[in-house]
Image (cartoon, helix red, strand yellow):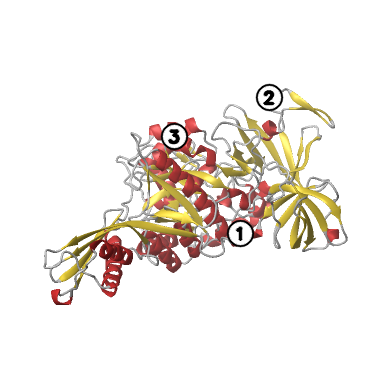
Amino acid sequence: MSLLPHQLELLAPARSADIGIEAVNHGADAVYIGGPGFGARSSADNSVADIARLVQHAHRFNSRIFVTMNTILRDDELEGARTLAWQLYESGVDALIVQDMGLLAIDMPPLQLHASTQCDIRTPEKARFLQDAGLTQLVLARELTLPQIAAIRAATDPTRSTLEFFVHGALCVAYSGQCYISAAHTGRSANRGECSQACRLPYQVIDSAGRFVAHDKHVLSMKDNNQSANIADLIDAGVRSFKIEGRYKDMAYVKNITAHYRKLLDEVIEVRQHSSNPLARASSGQTSFTFTPDPNQNFNREFTDYFVQGRQDTIGAFDTPKNPGLPIGYVTVVGPNWVELELSHKTTELHNGDGLCYYDLQKELVGLAINRAELISAKKGSWRVFPKDPMEGLPDLRKGVEVNRNRDASWLRQLINKSSDRRIGVWAKLAVLPDAVQLTLTDEDGTHATVQQPFPAANRQQAHDKAAAEVQIRSQLSRLGTTIFVAISTDITWSRGRFDAVLVPSSLLNALRREAVEALEAARAASFVRWLPGQAVEPPAPYPEDTLSYLANVFNRAARTFYARHGVKVIDAAYEAIEEPGEVSLMITKHCVRFSLSLCPKQAKGVTGVQGFVKAEPLQLVNGKEKLTLRFDCKPCEMHVVGKMKPAVAKQSRQELAQARVGTPMTFFKTRPLPAGEQFGH
């Protein structure tokens, strides 16, 4: 088991080891990071040595490090993945995040395996199966509602599996692992870490009669996820790991958002500490910040809590996939190389380096970076702004236009240097013995270390003011500023000698303190408990279905072996195997364009558009030469984006697969199960 059922884990992203270290410093109980390969963010890789450096820092606070190995693998990649997994195990990582079930069928190190978001966990049956297959942490689909999360928790065992849920960051519009548009149009597979993000493009939405329903709208682009208001509800539903999206994000984002959710989780823990079911953080120490966390200060497409509280009609960022920021004022005058603004709040300040933006007449977001900002009137809140770029590049900038700020340079400067302090509480006990002084430090986890220094009776001097002597001792022993510890209290006991109390030299106390801190750090490292891997039940739990389509993403023999062992009879190849030449669902999503455009049959029978009456029927998305069909499955309330692979892409992908398969042929059996006893391993 990893987390105890009452522990809450704040799981932060890291593009690099240095960002991961700051995530820990800002309160993360765990950090997830990409290794040198096989991660679903192809340009967010890190060396094993860098990950080992991050592990060493995180474990000082009992924080954990998870490494993403969540792409689907070809047969020729399995040995490399296995080798990397063992290297990561030896570096001290705590878990691997995986999508490919083939990894459960080969010789892996004794590490915990966590189910990636690409595993598409939407049902109690799927969650229970993955738990029974030995996965110890399950990241649930972001589309789930609170009752659906609670149903999954009821069907699983909190002592065997932890429920993980995304609480912040960018949203994939598709069910994770169920989007193949990038693979079909470019040959870059999202399931192999190379998504081209077709969902952020503008589309024409056209009905079956060729009429425009929407023009140049980003109808597949979602606002960003923000579950700040739902933390307590998610806890009550059974979530114990709260995941922040963002392995491409910069240091400032990780610092700010980690600090934001650290404060929210700590508030809940504080409120419930005296309840019948108290909660605890999953790692050690308390964190303080030199800034006030604010999610609005980082890049975002505005926020939504998605489906957690039920279907909403405001989840889309249809006008722009960029960061619109927050309104700050209006244009009053446009000059030859400057623009004057009147700010809505007179106390707001503009800074050199701020980013402003506004919508032009085509509803496109236009950015305006400030090269220099000058205050004209504090009373009126008037500012003159000199843009970094020429004025002719700012279309439709005129008097009365509302201006937003999407980058506050002054606020971001707070995060350039040290911006947090994470400390583990310790209790000190000093004992003045007949011929020595002994110091014991005990930390908040119960780990302790004892050291002592000689202090011969002949060198002792009576303290005429016992209280003052004790104040001096406590002052010296509490000086832990450069360590990871903070003093909570100090007890002092005096030996029975000719003096009631003695003066203990500061040099002796400082030496004791330094030695005790080193000993306590060593004791903490020695007492660190490495998680045991999950255990699959025997006999193997049956998979909830006996047939798997390309949507199961089976791309190698080991994965086929895994599913066959769990009772699956028919196993289709992954879409990336280029065995689906015709039209298929290239994306399955809970987001519904019909609903968002008020065309859902449950809303109305249709709407009157500029080209006539539009019915709720299959629609088409068009971007240049790319065309996709929208089909609607109303019973589960889902939308399918249908299309087929480009011939040129299919040809190129087949050539690449043929080269990769040399010596490792990949065969898929669609009409029979594996022969009894057939296995794949190393």
The quadrant holding residue 89 is bottom left
**Dot 3 and dot 2 residues touching (CB under 8 Å):** no
Amino acid type of the residue tagged 2 in the rendering: Gln
Q: Tell which circle, 2 or 1, labels the residue nearer the N-terminal end.
A: 1
Q: State whether residue 209 is above or below residue 662.
A: above
Amino acid type of the residue tagged 3 in the rendering: Ala
Estimate how packed mark 1 is, as few (under 14), some (14 to 19) or many (20 or more) residues with alpha carbons within 10 Å.
some
The quadrant holding residue 186 is bottom right
Q: Secondary structure at mark 1?
A: helix
Would residue 71 appear left or right of 86 to someone viewing this image? Answer: right
Marking on residue 603: 2
Which residue is rendered at x = 32% and y = 67% of the image?
476
Q: Secondary structure at mark 2?
A: loop
Estimate how packed mark 2 is, as few (under 14), some (14 to 19) or many (20 or more) residues with alpha carbons within 10 Å.
few
- Residue 567 shows in this picture: no
Image coordinates of residue 144 in percent, x first then y, are 52, 35
